[in-house]
Amino acid sequence: MSAITNLTRTWLTHSVKPFLFTNEYDQVLPYEDCENLGLYIHIPFCESICNFCPYCKTLYSEKLCNRYLDALLEEIHRVGCQTAEKKTVTSLYFGGGTPALVVDRIREIIEAVREHFIITEGIGLELHPDNVRVPVLQMLQAAGVTKISIGIQSFQEKFQQILGRKPVELDVMAAALQAVSFETVSMDFIFALPGQNFADLRTDIDTAFANGANHIAIYPFIDFTFTRSPVRALPKKQKRKLLDDITRYCLDQGYVRNSIWTFAKEEKAGYSSMTRDNFLGFGCSATTLLKEQFKINTFSVEAYCERVQSGKLPTSLTIRFTRRQRMVYYLFWTAYSTRVDAVDFERFFGVPLKRMYGTALLLARAFRFVTYQDGIYRMTLKGAFYYHYYENFYTLAYIDKMWGIMRREDFPEQIRL
Ligand SMILES: C[S@@+](CC[C@H](N)C(=O)[O-])C[C@H]1O[C@@H](n2cnc3c(N)ncnc32)[C@H](O)[C@@H]1O
Ligand code: SF4
């Protein structure tokens, strides 16, 4: 598996140099001149822990949570103060864990962010289905949240059972969504679970759109090595058939595919913290991607609080990119939106995409992974599947390894990928 990712990395970066992350980091982050900058805030608390979930999270406790949120506000102010004027950013996303658990402090956090940043495209936040209740939604709306994403996973009891989650209370949730509206209501599903077929997924998609969602995200089940889930995803062939069937069904219904895994009922509905050129991340495990570096905060809630309270940034690891490495990063995340615009690439790097990746793009077109029109490379159905397939390798070779280490060590000396 790592042979595939190593080969691709060597080919696309024109170098055998690995991605090297070290614990040497900047106290001042160079984001002032970054265009298309997004913000991300991580809230690592959950009411109960799902054994398949790879994210940085811990059981909710009021005391720990308040300590964490105080440190989070400090980190936001420390980074936000680093520019002379308020910085314009595209969006702010709250992820977790379960950010809706701290609904009573969301307004305070957003106000802290707004002291330093001007948000132009709205604020998104993740909820567990149990959080989808009128008072919670009203508080989120009043705080300025414009997009919500709900972790449904499946509307069917048998798949919730496989995942160790309880059934979703559909009527209660739908009534709350009808009472309080948001620009985007997204619902998350997991596919390729044992025994799952297209009819199961079609029911999930239809139920979502009939009960308040205008956007859905359908993720393939990923079996991370460090989680304790006994569930094994369906084999490649069945997974591909499912992904193709889901895509065709959604496109036939007139839904817009706005990333590999997401479909929107209306053009205005979107939910993605990933497809930004640059982003700043706050909170434990949050990542920051800038022009020349990528950094990741410590995964430990305790170590995060201590670091911030000692006047420093909670950075655990940083990679300083070579130009080619940054290009690969850019292309990988931009391709997630299923399209790459040659003009945007040239604006970002100051060199034509064709000059840097002419052969790779010719091959991609010859294999019908992408089509090309008016400067835009669009992924075909086949291309989207292979991107998905490659992303699976990437997730298991890179993210799995890195997160596995970060869960054990607060500040590892270095990681080579
Ligand atoms: C932070 S959770 C969503 C909010 C909330 N904590 C919840 O569980 O409802 C983010 C999403 O990641 C997805 N996810 C988690 N573990 C996954 C795995 N092993 N494979 C694929 N998707 C996964 C789930 O769809 C989940 O809704
Ligand atoms: S899936 Fe959601 S509720 Fe479950 S552990 Fe992960 S973040 Fe928490």
Image (spheres, rainbow, N blue to C red):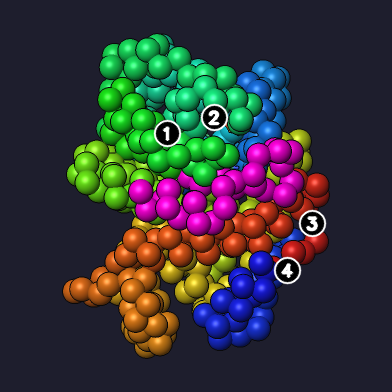
Residue 103 visible in rendering: no
Q: Is 396 drawn above or below residue 376 in the view shown?
A: above
The residue singled out by tag 4 in the image is 416
Q: Which sits earlier in the primary sequence, circle 2 or circle 4?
A: 2
Q: Which residues are magenta?
A: 219-245
Gap between marks 3 and 1 measured at Cα: 43 Å
Residue in front for this viewpoint, 44 or 76:
44
* Residue 385 visible, this angle: yes
Quadrant of the image for the N terminus? bottom right
- Write down the residue under mark 3: 412
Amino acid found under the numbered disc labelled 1: Asp
Front disc: 2 or 4:
2
Image x and y of residue 247, in percent:
33, 49
Q: Vertically, is 123 above or below 367?
A: above
Residue 294 picture quarter: bottom right
Q: Which of the numbered marks, if any, corresponds to residue 159?
A: 2
Q: Nearer the viewer, residue 95 or 371?
A: 371
- Pointer 1 local density, CA inside 10 Å: few below 14, some 14–19, many at least 20: some
Q: Secondary structure at mark 4?
A: strand
* 237 magenta-colored: yes
Query: Could you say which disc has been placed on residue 200 in the image?
Result: 1
**For the residue carrying disc 3, how many other residues have a C-alpha within 10 Å: few (<14), some (14-19), or many (20+)?**
some
Q: Which mark is residue 265?
A: none
Check contact, mark 2 vs mark 4: CB within 8 A. no
Contact flag, marks 3 and 1 (Cβ < 8 Å): no
x, y percentage for residue 54? 65, 42
> Which mark's residue is nearer the viewer, 3 or 1?
1
At horizontal 49% and vertical 32% (from top left) the residue drawn is 153
> Mark 4 or mark 1, which is nearer to you?
1
Q: CA distance from mark 4 to mark 3?
A: 11 Å
Amino acid identity at mark 3: Pro
